Image: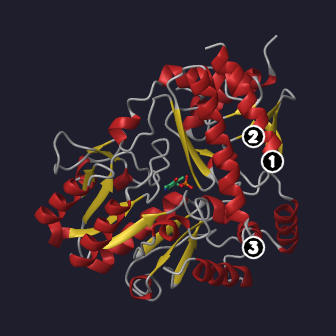
Amino acid sequence: MSSRSEQLFERAQQRIPGGVNSPVRAFRSVGGTPRFFAAGDGARVRDVDGLSYIDYVGSWGPLILGHAHPEVVAAVQQAALRGLSFGAPTAGEVEIAELLCELLPSLEMVRLVSSGTEATMSAIRLARGFTGRDLLIKFEGCYHGHSDSLLVKAGSGMLTFGNPSSSGVPADFVRHTLVLDYNDSIGLAAAFAEHGPRIAAVIVEAVAGNMNLIAPQPAFLQNLRELCSRHSAVLIFDEVMSGFRVGAQGAQGLYGIIPDLTTLGKVIGGGMPVGAFGGKREIMSRIAPLGPVYQAGTLSGNPVAVAAGLATLRLLQAEGFYESLAQRTRQLTDGLSAAAGKHGVPFSAQAIGGMFGLYFRSECPQSYAEVMECDTQAFNRFFHAMLDAGHYFAPSAFEAGFVSAAHSESDVATTIAAAEAVFRAW
Ligand SMILES: *Cc1c(COP(=O)(O)O)cnc(C)c1O
């Protein structure tokens, strides 16, 4: 007898490429059948076979309050009763724009979109329009959504232009994107020395969460800020993941760096499709209808999505919210590290706010190359053993994990105990 997840996956693959609407969900790197989820409540999700899991994915970051938070759900229900979409301005959009600008001091103006991909794509167009330059710098291993000019991997040598990392992206498009190593201040300085007057923007995950989790070296972010200022390039912090996740003011607050533009998504929609980009008024004023840079969206600022985002952002303002989230996340990473250490498994882990990285490697990696040295087979074994025990981690060794405010001390202790049993039998 196959499980309902297996039956659904079978059906899904007939009509949906790979059976999924976003590739990592297909469990290709860990093997096995993805779980189809039926419901979520707080820290837990339940699959279609009735199995329950403590969830450390949280829809890949948005669910910082856990699944189906009653106040967020109520806000969505009330908004839905008033109408699903108008394609005309609503009060909620003004409220969330004001709140975002109040919470993130680098934002003077902000525009809403419906995904992180749209936010970064639009921010880059804006930076190019603002500077009148074409060249974009990104860093290997950072992900900024799936628009053409960002699906680039490093070329064969330093300071060479990137190659498309996806079929279907013309090589001509990525000729304008330079790919450098994360945390490599020397490479960065060399790129500016060679191409400075042509660089429109640098886009960076100020905490990198798409190659597992890599902490920025503070000097790297400072160098970025200085070089962009000196060469009049736009510094874009892609905080789609880190925004309102690593701290109350995202990575920019944590490291005290003020970017020119910031992109947001995930948490600011509370589980609904919301993205945003914002920053200096001088730059944001170049967007249509104020300026010549075109950007638009039929469902941008959708009232139901905005209601979820507003309710979420307001709940994050509770006294001590980020302190206790960070503490709970550290409880997890410290506990997992201790459990692995006790049984001699090469493993390390780190937490930044409500985000964490687990590495099958004895030290936390600081670069893309070091992340690539992690033992993926060991991860896959850990992943499946934990899944069987009712703990849902991201189905890839190269994804960050997320703890929510709904995870209790005892939820995390349960996960650590399960991991210890896995490491004992390693
Ligand atoms: C998730 C993510 C994106 C893309 O957001 P989507 O909503 O999936 O389009 C962009 N940048 C970063 C840093 C992300 O983590």
Q: Is residue 224 left or right of residue 55?
A: left
Q: Is residue 84 above or below residue 19?
A: below
- Label 2 and label 1: CA atoms lie apart by 6 Å
What x and y, as percent, mark residue 198? 18, 69
Residues at discs 2 and 1 in contact (Cβ within 8 Å): yes
So how many labels did they put on this image? Answer: 3
Please give the name of the residue rendered at 75% of the width and 73% of the height, measured from the top-left corner. 314
Q: Earlier in the sequence, mark 1 or mark 3?
A: 3
Q: Is residue 157 visible?
A: yes
Circle 2 sits on which residue? 412
What x and y, as percent, mark residue 216? 41, 55
- Label 1 and label 3: CA atoms lie apart by 21 Å
Under mark 1, the amino acid is Ser
- Label 2 and label 3: CA atoms lie apart by 25 Å
Q: Nearer the viewer, residue 372 or 340?
A: 340
Residue 241's tag is none
Q: Secondary structure at mark 2?
A: helix
Q: Secondary structure at mark 3?
A: helix
Q: Nearer the viewer, residue 424 or 242?
A: 424
Residue 314's tag is 3
Q: Is residue 381 above or below residue 202?
A: above
Eye-nearest disc, 1 or 3: 1
What x and y, as percent, mark residue 192? 18, 65
> Dot 3, crowdedness within 10 Å: few (<14), some or many (≥20)?
few
Under mark 2, the amino acid is Val
